[in-house]
Amino acid sequence: MTTIQIEVQDDLVQRLGVAAVQKLLEEELAYQRFKLLEESIQASMQAAEGVDWEKEFEQARQEAFDDYQRQQREK
């Protein structure tokens, strides 16, 4: 991980506080990372020709639901 230093306007730091500014930046960077991962996944899915994604997602949903039902019965 890399540490960076940035300039932040004094009025923002005074009104929000250092911790709030830091949290705001961390949340924005986490969102941007998630967005980049999404773009990568979308590109990979589009590159995979011949895959019926609706069928794949439905199968995964059904398996998850079956697991959930099994866990409920075991309680």
Image (cartoon, rainbow, N blue to C red):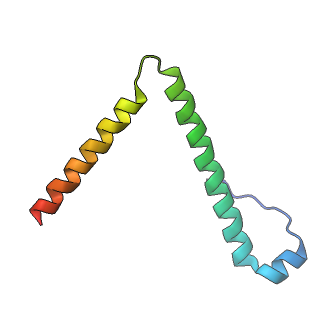
Identify the residue at the far left of this view: 74
Query: How many circles with numbers are drawn on the protein?
Result: 0
Look at 12% across and 67% down and name the residue there.
75
Look at 86% across and 65% down and name the residue there.
7
Q: Classify 65 as above or below 58.
A: below
Position of residue 66 in the picture relative to residue 37 (left or right): left
Look at 77% across and 80% down and name the residue there.
16
Between 22 and 73, the one nearer to me in the picture: 73
Q: Classify 22 as above or below 73.
A: below
Q: Quadrant of residue 42?
A: top right
Q: Position of residue 15 (x, y in %)?
A: 82, 82
Position of residue 57 in the picture relative to residue 20 (left or right): left
Q: Position of residue 60 (x, y in %)?
A: 31, 40
Identify the residue at the far top of this view: 50
Q: Position of residue 26 (x, y in %)?
A: 66, 63
Q: Classify 13 as above or below 27.
A: below
Q: Quadrant of residue 18?
A: bottom right
Q: Classify 44 as above or below 27.
A: above
